[in-house]
Amino acid sequence: MAFLDYVNVDIGFWDVLLTIILLYLIYIMFIKKDNPKVEYVIPPLKKQDLTLEELKKYNGKDDEHICFAIFGKILDVSRAPNFYGPGGPYGSLGGHDATRALGTMDPQNVKDTYDDISDLTEMEKETAKDWLDKLSMKYPTVGRLLANGEEPKDYGGEVSKIEF
């Protein structure tokens, strides 16, 4: 008790309030665990061949999936809605044959009808092929873009995946 005789401690309202705030901050910073945020993942599409009309719905507006075709190969780019979705820099490619747009490096250069790319230069075709090679390593292949009269292939319920 002799020690307490020499200590004169006045605890006021502000001391209690600051202690409570300090303890709360320590709790928040070191003890409380954040609940992990669950991100919604768009389920993969089943492999399927599509006509241009069927492809048009995969534009990020009419369907949550975003797909486009390059040289007849349909890619599911839904993982990158900031690039390929509505309002994105390449949003015009969604639901279209993007071969011409990527070959000419002009995202607005897409057609709403089947695009015969025979008028592209060899350099433009090579540029589009380079894009296809890069994007095929990053995004799942859904199937083929069917020309008029072509029959779709039966993939037996297989899910789209990245194909090298």
Image: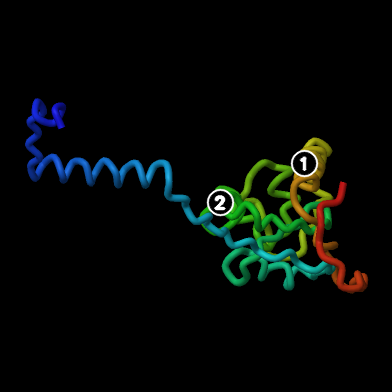
Q: Residue at x 15, y 27 (%)?
A: 3
Label 2 Cα crowd, 10 Å radius (few <14 / some 14-19 / many 20+): few
Q: Position of residue 105 (x, y in %)?
A: 67, 41
Which residue type carries mark 2? Asn
121 w.r.t. 54: above or below? above
Q: Residue at x 62, y 48 (%)?
A: 107
- Is 1 or 110 nearer to us in this picture? 1
Report if residue 36 is visible in the image. Answer: yes
Label count reads 2
Q: Position of residue 48 (x, y in %)?
A: 83, 69
Label 1 Cα crowd, 10 Å radius (few <14 / some 14-19 / many 20+): few
What is the quadrant of the N terminus in the image? Answer: top left
User: Which residue is the extreme one toward the front?
Assistant: 1
Q: Which mark is residue 134?
A: 1
Q: Secondary structure at mark 2?
A: helix
Looking at marks 2 and 1 on the same chain, the residue that comes earlier in the sequence is marked by 2
How far is disc 2 from disc 1 in space, using C-alphas?
Answer: 18 Å
Q: Position of residue 149 (x, y in %)?
A: 89, 74
Q: Is residue 79 left or right of residue 140?
A: left
Q: Residue at x 70, y 42 (%)?
A: 104
- Label 2 belongs to which residue? 82
Which residue type carries mark 1? Lys
Give the colour scheme of this rendering.
rainbow
- Is 20 or 70 nearer to us in this picture? 20
Q: Position of residue 25 (x, y in %)?
A: 31, 43
160 w.r.t. 30: above or below? below
- Is 148 or 153 nearer to us in this picture? 153
Report if residue 150 is visible in the image. Answer: no
